[in-house]
Image (cartoon, helix red, strand yellow):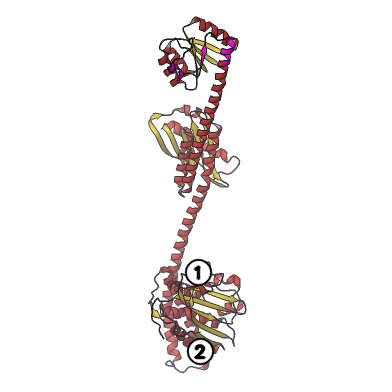
Amino acid sequence: MIKILLVSENNNNTKKFNKIFDKNGYEFSVMTDETLICDIISVDPPDIIIVDAEIPNIKSLNKKVKSLCENTIIIFIISADRVDKELIKYANAFINGEMPEDLILSTINVNLRMKNSLDMLSNSNKDLADSLYRLNALYSTSSQFAGTLEKSKLIQYMIEGMDKALSFSLTCTLSLCTEDEPVLILNSLYELSDELITAIKLRTVLNYNSVFEGKEVPIKIDAENLKVIKHIKYPASRFTFTLFQYDNMFAPISLGDNFFGCIEIFKETSFTPEDATCFQTIAQQVSLPLKSATLYQEIIETNAKLEKLERLKSEFISIVSHELRTPLTSIKNSLDIMMSGRCGEITPSADKFLSMAMRNVQRLSGIINDLLDLSKIEAGKMDFNFAPTNINTVIGYVKSALSEVAKSKGLNLLTEETENLPVINADAQRLEQVLTNLVSNAIKFTPENKTIKISSSIISYKDIKINEYFRDTIKLPEGDYIQVCVEDEGIGIASKDLLHAFDKFAQIENSLSRKAGGTGLGLPIAKQLLEAHKGAIWCDSELNKGSKFCFVIPLVREAANIN
C-alpha cells in the first residue's frame, strides 16, 4: 500500500487530503512534531511526504528528511504564486491547497510513477554493482589459483575469495590434501567454544559421509580425532549455538574421481541465488589447480625416487666395475704368462683355448671400461684434456688400429679426408674413443667383402643435414664445424629404431646384432662425449643397405691450421 505522510498544522489541509487519499486507498497519516517525523521516516520511510510550506522550522525539517530518505518524494503545499528558492532544492513538486482534487491526485500519481522508476533504477544499479564486485572477486581468486601449485595456499585463496564475495560468518573447510591427515579449517568472525567446535566437527563428518552415500569413502574420518585449525577474526566476541540457525551452503571440492575435501559456509543474513552461484563457482574453480598441484607433487616425488635409483645404479656400476677389474687383471696376466711359454710347452689345443680365454678377457675388459666411463660421465667426473686437435690425426690412429681387424673379416677400410682442416678444441683421446666405437660397430655389423669409409670435412652450420628423427633433440649454434662420418654397407637400422640407437643398454633387434653381442653402451657414451665437446652425433640408415654415423665439433676460432 502507498504510504503518504502529511506535515501540516492546517486542519483544512488535513481534511482535504484525508478525503482524497482515503477514497483512493492510500495509507495516510499526519504529523507535526519534527523529532517524531524523523524517527518514523528513519524506520519506515513513506513513499511521499507532503509538507505545508507554512510550518515553522521548515528548512531544518527539509534537511533532516532528505538526509534520512533520499528516494522519498517531497511535495510542498504553497499558497502564494511565488516559491521560496530554498524549497526548490528539496521539492519534487508543488501543489496549491485550492487545486481541484483530480489535479492533486494526478500530481501525486505522476510522482509515484517517477519514484517507482527511480527505485527500479537504483535496485538495478545495486544489482549491477554487486555482480561486478562478485566478478572482480572471482577474477582475483582465479588469478591467485593460477599462481601457485601449493595446495595449502590454494585452499587459503578459496576461503579468502569466498570472504570477499560473500562476507561469511563462518566457513568449515574439510581438507584431505593439505596435510598428511584430514584437517578441519575453521575461518570465523568470532570465537568458538569447545562445545561448538565439537558440534561443528560432527556436522562436518556427517556432511562428508553424505557425499559418498552408498559408496566407499576415500578416507574414514573420526570426528573425535579430527584435527582442527582455527582462524578467528574478532576473538573478543563469541558465537553461540544459534550459529546453526544461520543460512548455510555446502559444496564438495572435487574433480571427477579426485576428491580434495568439502566446504560449508554460514551467514547471518540469507544467501541470494547469485551468492549460491558464486559459492559453487569458487568451490569448482579450486578443484582443477588442486589436481594439478597433486600431479606436480607426484612428479616431484617420482623424480626424487628416480634420481635416487639412478644414483644408486651409478654407484653400483662403479663399485662392481672396480671390483671386477682386479681379478680380471690377474686372469689376463696369468694368460699372458701361459701363452708366452714360460710355464711349459703349449699344445695346439691348449693354445686354442688360451686364445679364446684371452679374447673374452679383452671383451670383458672393454665392457667394464664402458661401464666405468658411463658412470663417470653421469656423475660429472669424466676428465677431459682439451687442446687444439687435427681430426685427421685421430682418424689416422683409428685406421691403423682397426685395419687388421677389418681385413681379417674381409672388409675394406677406407678414409676420405679433407686436407689442411682447421683445428678443433678437443680431447684427442676421447675423440679416438668415439671414432673407434663407430668403426668397431661398422666392422661388427657389416658382412664380408663390403666397404667401410671414414670421411672428414669442414661444413657450415646451414649445410649440416641432420636426419629428421634427430632435429628436435639437436640444437647447434651458428658457425663452422668439422664433420666426421663413418659409412658402412652393413645390416642397417630400421627407421623406428633410429632414435633408440643412442639409448643406454639398447640393442637393435635383429639376428646379427644379437649374434655380435655387446652392452649397448658405446653409442650413448659417444653421444655424451661429443656433447661435452659442444658437438652432436646422429645417424642415417636404411635396413639391409647400411648406416652412416656422423658427428660434428665446432671449430676453434682464429686458430692456425695443423698439417
Q: Secondary structure at mark 2?
A: helix
Residue 22's place in the image compared with 200, above or below, is above
Q: Which residues are magenta?
A: 81-106
Q: Quadrant of residue 214?
A: top right
Q: Is residue 510 visible?
A: yes
Residue 375 image point, x, y percent? 43, 71
Closer to the camera, 518 or 163? 163
Q: Secondary structure at mark 1?
A: loop
Closer to the camera, 223 or 418? 418
Residue on which disc 2 sits: 404
Give the number of marks.
2
The residue located at (42%, 72%) in the rendering is 376
Closer to the camera, 132 or 522? 132
Q: Residue furthest front?
A: 81
Q: Is residue 517 visible?
A: no
Q: Amino acid at mark 2?
A: Glu
Residue 182 image point, x, y percent? 47, 43
Q: Residue furthest right?
A: 544
Q: Nearer the viewer, mark 1 or mark 2?
A: 1
Closer to the camera, 277 or 299? 277
Q: CA distance from mark 1 to mark 2?
A: 35 Å
Looking at the rendered image, the quarter that the C terminus falls into is: bottom left
Q: Which mark is residue 305?
A: none
Residue on which disc 1 sits: 474
Tell me whether circle 1 and circle 2 mark residues in contact (CB < 8 Å).
no
Q: Amino acid at mark 1?
A: Ile
Q: Tell me: 539 left or right of 38.
A: right
